[in-house]
Amino acid sequence: MTTQRAPASLRRRRNIGIISHIDAGKTTVTERILYYTGLTHKLGEVHDGQAVMDWMQQERERGITISAAATTCDWQRHQITIIDTPGHVDFTIEVERSLRVLDGAVAIFAAVEGVQPQSESVWHQANRYRVPRLAFINKMDRLGADHERVLQDIRDTLGASPLLLQLPLGTEEHFQGIIDLIDMQCVSWRADDAGMTPETGAIPPEFEEAAQAQRAALLETVAEHDDDLLERYLAGEPLDAEAIRSAVRKSTLSGALVPVLLGSGLHNKGIQPLLDAIVWYLPSPVDVPSITGVEPTEETAAERHNDPSEPLAALAFKVALDQGRRLTYLRLYAGCLEAGTQIYNPRTGANERVARLLRMHANKRQRLDRAQAGDIVAATGLKDATTGDTLCDPAHPIRFEAIAYPEPVINLAVEPMTNAEQDKLQSALEKLAAEDPTLQVQFDEERGHTILSGMGELHLEVLIRRLADEFKLAVNVGKPQVVYRETIQGEAECSETFDREIAGKRQVAEVTLAVAPAASGAGLEFAGTPPEDAEAPADMIDAV
Ligand code: GDP
């Protein structure tokens, strides 16, 4: 393990998440980002199953993003690592662990639907981790698109202060581009080059008045949060774009304001300004507060400052199987990590050797000799580290707070097609459970079934499909059953919002499944005490 001085390049690093409600356009927007930053050479569209970020076969088929895929791209000499996080409530936990390691986020809202329940819960999760955010109002081309209404939703429902940086140039199907209220110019995109070359020009006279008024509102809002700018604004001094951007950056980092941009991912409009805004306004690893370890010893409770010259400290935030290989995703908070070195895991009290370090791109993996504070990388060779573990320099142990998980809400009985496959099933489920802390697996000796407990029907359906696709294991499944529990374990660690969301989900599951009690699966054991009038489980087993 080696150390070195903090490189200037750390300031040119952005680790961001893209968060939103399902269908708001996260995958489409991420695809466009990869296209314009030169990582992909073909625009993949979600509906034709071409999206590069959705690399799992199922994601392609279902058009949803299941696991957080990290990808790194370059823009304006900055390195941006994007974690694409799922919008479906069954995978909320993926969002949770991503937020834990990211420095900033882009929240995507659809211009017609606005703030939806899942955008609200993800927003509150991000508040809990104090993640500075930008908002991107997507689908500005759609009939009924209304960015003003979305801004009002952001104020009323999310309790945030949006700062509109652009006006739309044209509405609905005539949406051609944006009016940039800082540079006071128009930016539009042509269809014939897939939006590759933004064209800038003067603001057309019919938009001039609205643009001036909106710019004045923008300056007033920013000045309220920046004394220098306020003084210059009140003195009537002309304000240059750089001074305005620097003030917007400050208020974004402090969480006081949320800059808002407009666009249409599908029609390739507004993506380059979004990339500029990520670089200009979202934090680099050196802008985020230092992180302090937790008890029990003084040494493990030390501070780390996102500095490569300190002893190594990293958080494992995701374990994933990648073509049969176990990948441990790490966020480095201090020090440097070289491939082939030993790292210490305070939870197990043992050292483990990192075999390879990989930087994940959308469709390829790049081998690295070393990684440093601020980096998000995937390591191979780690067998015992699980999600939430701290990994550190053996001579300087530290332990970060673990990631809190809610208890499962749905049970499902499964059994292999033949008894001979029981061991294979067990081993496959162990691998999947190592990757997914919200999956619990128990063997019911009496009935000879394995019980899977997860966060929702989609969650368990996806796992069944993964057994078939990745492990070539077809299984018989019972009917899903609600897990009955009086309280949610780990309540103290989870926020109130998060608990409410899970509790709400449990209620929805109870209502949905109560509609067909006779269809409950045989052999299923309730995780808690079932209500007295609960139906005796009927026959299970639908072949998949
Ligand atoms: P995600 O679930 O948030 O990842 O959303 P997707 O990127 O999968 O998009 C959901 C649907 O909206 C897909 O059918 C997209 O083609 C469509 N879509 C995405 N962006 C836009 C847009 O800017 N305008 C329109 N009209 N449709 C869009």
Image: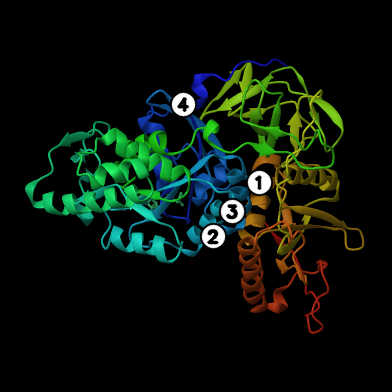
Quarter of the view holding residue 70: top right
Most extreme residue toward the left is: 205
Q: Which residue is mark 3?
A: 128
Mark 4–mark 3 CB contact (< 8 Å): no
Mark 3–mark 1 CB contact (< 8 Å): no
Q: Which residue is mark 1?
A: 466
Measured in 3D between alpha carbons, the distance from the residue under mark 3 to the one under mark 1, in whole angstroms, is: 32 Å
Q: Earlier in the sequence, mark 2 or mark 1?
A: 2
Find residue 100 and report its horizontal and vertical position in percent: 62, 44
Find residue 386 and report its horizontal and vertical position in percent: 75, 39
Q: Nearer the viewer, mark 2 or mark 1?
A: 2
Q: Amino acid at mark 1?
A: Arg
Q: Nearer the viewer, mark 4 or mark 1?
A: 4
Element on which disc 3 rests: helix
Residue at the image position 85 percent from the left and 36 percent from the top: 348
Measured in 3D between alpha carbons, the distance from the residue under mark 4 to the one under mark 3, in whole angstroms, is: 25 Å
Q: Which residue is mark 2?
A: 121
